Image (cartoon, rainbow, N blue to C red):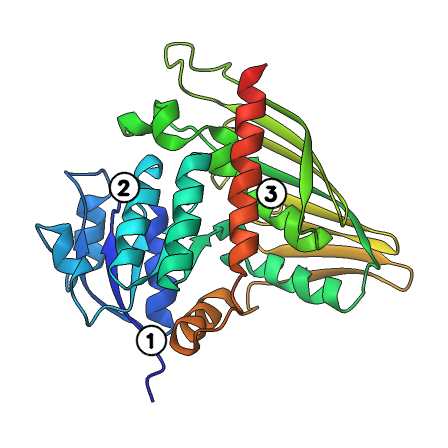
């Protein structure tokens, strides 16, 4: 009985494709072909890292290959919806880098396509699915370690850096805006940990303070939400200082009525350069857990979902709601 997938790749414009593909290959999947438009900055590294994955000239060579089960997509954000729809219509399940789409019209087209094809459209919210400390936090919350979750506070700091960036990185219509792009991570975690299946946006804001010569760039954003399971605050920025040993000190604070959890995803400031630190306190104990050896469940679950036509990695409705709220918050922020 088949227990793994044959993958194809469409679009390698964002470096997230490396982690997406690596995790699936670790689970035993195979990948023979990729297609990408032009010569993205990631191309040389991709060819060096995966010398046995051949580039095809035509996207249709991947779409029409009946041996391919799932397509991984990390193209320019504005193109991810159309690439996903093409892939779904060709009979392939999809894992797409976040944001999976950049407009509400794209999202509606994706919903119709998923309904028509019966295929899976999974958005890879890597700040949940690739972070072992977040997986551990989900276990602790399910065990009732901090009681009922009342609020999440999620931060998404990033480093601009002095290295070369593609033109689309600074173009609002291409990357979707800071809340759609980065904030979708934190909105997703807010929904997961508060167990909310509906929410309203109370406040949203975006600013550009460091790149006045790039009017489409946004280097700061914040969102406040209320869901039917709890509350959420999100802060996003491109202000990571040069001395920090990683690209961003991403954190997640989960407040319960009997305790709280703090996750330090990528570094433990001035203490450890490693990530995946989880701290929690409740009425019985205060603890620190090094989560580096905690298994990431998303990838094997997604493989099994494709093989068994199940829904264990992430529900389709949760994926839709995450992107809907992120785009709505982006639109609200830009009206001000």
Q: Is residue 200 left or right of residue 298?
A: right
The one nearer the camera, 133 or 325, is: 325
The one nearer the camera, 113 or 46, is: 113
Residue 110 in view: yes
* SS at mark 1 in the image: loop
Alpha-carbon neighbours of circle 2 within 10 Å: few (<14), some, or many (≥20)? many
Foreground mark, 3 or 2, reads 3
Pointers 3 and 2 in contact (C-beta within 8 Å): no
C-alpha gap between disc 1 and disc 2: 24 Å
The residue wearing badge 1 is: 28
C-alpha gap between disc 3 and disc 1: 31 Å
The residue wearing badge 3 is: 187
* SS at mark 3 in the image: helix
Foreground mark, 3 or 1, reads 3
Q: Position of residue 122 (x, y in %)?
A: 44, 57
Q: Quadrant of the C terminus?
A: top right
Alpha-carbon neighbours of circle 1 within 10 Å: few (<14), some, or many (≥20)? few
**Residue in view at x 15 percent, y 51 percent:** 59
Residue 245's tag is none
Q: Is residue 177 above or below residue 279?
A: above
Q: Earlier in the sequence, mark 1 or mark 2?
A: 2
Q: Position of residue 168 (x, y in %)?
A: 30, 28
Q: Earlier in the sequence, mark 3 or mark 1?
A: 1
Pointers 3 and 1 in contact (C-beta within 8 Å): no
C-alpha gap between disc 3 and disc 2: 24 Å
Q: Position of residue 214 (x, y in %)?
A: 37, 14
The one nearer the camera, 315 or 133, is: 315
């Amino acid at each position: 009985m088949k227990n793994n997938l044959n993958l194809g790749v469409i679009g390698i414009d964002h470096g997230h494709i490396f982690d997406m593909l690596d995790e699936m290959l670790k689970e035993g999947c195979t990948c023979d072909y990729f297609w990408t438009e032009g010569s993205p900055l990631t191309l040389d590294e991709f060819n060096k890292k995966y010398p046995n994955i051949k580039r095809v000239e035509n996207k249709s060579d991947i779409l029409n290959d009946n041996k391919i089960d799932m397509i991984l997509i990390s193209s320019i954000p504005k193109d991810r919806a159309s690439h996903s729809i093409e892939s779904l219509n060709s009979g392939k399940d999809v894992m797409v880098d976040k944001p999976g789409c950049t407009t509400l019209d794209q999202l509606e087209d994706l919903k119709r396509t998923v309904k028509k094809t019966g295929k899976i459209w999974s958005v890879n919210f890597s700040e949940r699915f690739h972070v072992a400390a977040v997986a551990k936090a989900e276990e602790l919350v399910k065990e009732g370690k901090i009681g009922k979750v009342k609020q999440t506070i999620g931060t998404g700091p990033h480093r601009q850096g002095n290295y070369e960036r593609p033109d689309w990185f600074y173009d609002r219509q291409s990357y979707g805006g800071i809340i759609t792009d980065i904030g979708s991570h934190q909105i997703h975690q807010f929904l997961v940990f508060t167990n909310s299946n509906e929410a309203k946006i109370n406040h949203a804001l975006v600013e550009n303070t460091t790149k006045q010569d790039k009017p489409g760039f946004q280097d700061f954003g914040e969102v406040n939400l209320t869901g039917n399971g709890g509350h959420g605050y999100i802060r996003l920025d491109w202000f990571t200082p040069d001395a920090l040993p990683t690209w961003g000190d991403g954190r997640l604070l989960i407040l319960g009525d009997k305790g709280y959890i703090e996750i330090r995803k990528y570094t433990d400031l001035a203490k450890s350069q490693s990530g995946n630190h989880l701290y929690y306190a409740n009425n019985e104990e205060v603890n620190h857990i090094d989560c580096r050896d905690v298994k990431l469940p998303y990838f094997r679950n997604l493989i099994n979902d494709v093989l068994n036509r199940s829904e264990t990695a992430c529900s389709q409705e949760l994926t839709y709601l995450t992107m809907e709220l992120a785009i709505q918050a982006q639109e609200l922020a830009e009206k001000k």
